[in-house]
Amino acid sequence: MRADIVVCGLGPAGRALAHRCLTRGLSVLAIDPHPDRAWTATYAGWQDELPSWLAPEAIAATVRQPIAWALREHRLHRPYVVLDTARLRESLPLDGARVLADRAVELGPRTATLASGRTITAARVIDARGIARSPALAEQTAYGVIVDAARAAGIAPLFMDWRPDNGAEPGAPPSFLYAVPLGGGSMLLEETCLAGRPAIDTGVLRDRLHRRLRCRAIALTDTDPVERARFPLEGGGPGRRRFGAAGGFTHPATGYSVAAALAAADAVAAGGAPTPVSARAVHALRKAGLRALLALPPAEIPDFFEAFFTLPDSLQRAYLSGRTDPRGTVAAMNALFAAVPARLRRRIAVATIFR
């Protein structure tokens, strides 16, 4: 069985790539053990990261100026969008592709060997299967509830809220509140462990979220829909045949990868490299940034983000979104190093330089 391109994995990254290949007239074969499985996570990103071809109905809500709380409130001057998961999937049709419900077990430059024993041949084989969990990998975890907007009226959309009203013990790994509208009159309120090795258990995050919301006079019910998340922040790496999280697209400071994959899908469909040299450099810099974050004492995390959110908007944007901008990433990291309290600099320098 032959095709112009084989895409292994039909999560948001793989499906977006397969869809854009089809729009270019390529013959596409997509492989996934459960190709019809619905996506249940909430995906979001910055509005200026999204490609122009993305269907408007894939966006559930737009927050013009989300808020970040570290030691004080910071208003982020950059529109933030929450995607409608079901409509995003529907907006990436695979009409014309051959889709196999199978698992790719061995990939070569032009072949894919499947669990069923079949071998597929193509001009290109792309691995978009994501990253397998491992105790050796830093992870992000989250526990959230979806409530009607009226009950959450007292909470503004929050990119991060590190205020200590979640009942966490002093010295315990910290977590923050993430709060975004989902459209249709509902809002996601989520307690998130940004990065941990190991990450905070979702049961602990549930207790913290309930405590935090009680402090803010928001009542929950037993029927409120629940969202849990747990995924690796590392483990993927840049490569000519890897895309999405498998290709190192996951940002270790946010956990985001979907918007980056959507933005890159057209260029890769046209034959471009998923990770050009500039993206490899940024990936290495972000890995160093993750090491620094993991090395910080829990009590110092809010100070670290206080310094980050005082940086100029251009530097925040460069670090959060500049996947192919090593110069901007270095400038942001240098400015952040200068802005953090002096007591943290040696720890950050050691963690950043030494693996």
Image: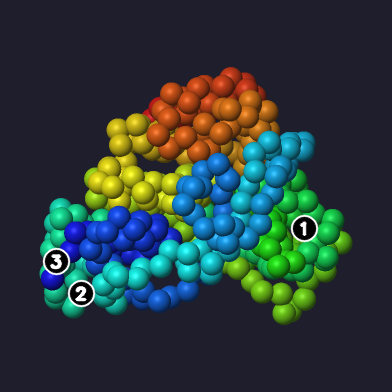
- From the image, state whether disc 3 or disc 1 is nearer to you: 3
Name of the residue lying farthest toward the right = 217
Report the label total.
3
Q: Is residue 249 above or below residue 6?
A: above
Q: Nearer the viewer, residue 333 or 21?
A: 21
Q: Residue 73: x percent and y percent? A: 77, 38
* Label at residue 243: none
Crowd class of label 1 (few under 14; some 14 to 19; many from 20; radius 10 Å): many
Figure quadrant of the N terminus? bottom left
Can I make out residue 244 in this image? yes
- Res. 84 image quadrant: bottom right
* Label at residue 212: 1
Q: Say what amino acid the circle numbered 1 marks.
A: Arg
Q: Is residue 135 above or below residue 349?
A: below
N-term mark: 2 or 1: 2
Q: Residue 192: x percent and y percent? A: 62, 55
Q: Say which residue appears at 83% left-offset and 59% top-offset.
A: 153
